[in-house]
Image (spheres, rainbow, N blue to C red):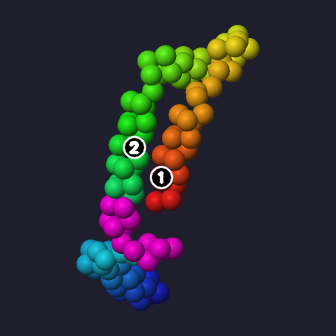
Amino acid sequence: MTQSRLLPTVLLAASSWLLISLFGSQQTSFLIGTSPAASSRQSRTAMRGFKDDFYAWKDSLSKDEQALLLKQAQNEFDKKFRKSDEFSQDLPEEKIQSFAKVLKKFFDN
């Protein structure tokens, strides 16, 4: 007997949830208060800008510097390579500063 009284309530709750989920397309983010589409558009633009700046910085490196970075990245977990002098070599200070500017610009967005 209680099952027959409970069934209409459950059906009403399920149908109202379905209507809200179908027609309630204007969602807001919990913390920001903007729609998810707007925030994803902003992050996509920021990533595109970072990508362009990063590739410009990467192209400014000489062939030797690019080879050094590649070798260091590939052998990051090689114990013998980590003990070598080649692992401890750094890029010139101006290259590091220009990369820091690229990262700062990305984190500011």
Q: In which image quadrant can residue 45 be found?
A: bottom left
Is residue 16 shown above or below 32? below
| Residue that appears at 38% across and 65% down | 39
Is residue 14 shown above or below 81? below
SS of the residue under disc 2: helix
Tell me if 7 is positioned left or right of 75 in this view.
left
Measure how far apart labels 1 and 2 are at the Cα level: 9 Å
Q: Amino acid at mark 2?
A: Asp
**Numbered badge on residue 106:** 1
The part of the chain drawn in magenta is 29-42
- The residue pinned by badge 2 equals 53
Residue 82 is covered by the magenta coloring: no
Q: Amino acid at mark 1?
A: Phe
Residue 20 visible at all: yes
Q: In which image quadrant can residue 17 be found?
A: bottom left
SS of the residue under disc 1: helix
User: Is 26 in front, or is 106?
Assistant: 106
Residue lying furthest left in this view? 23
| Residue that appears at 39% across and 55% down | 46
User: Is 6 in front, or is 105?
Assistant: 105
User: Is 4 in front, or is 11?
Assistant: 11
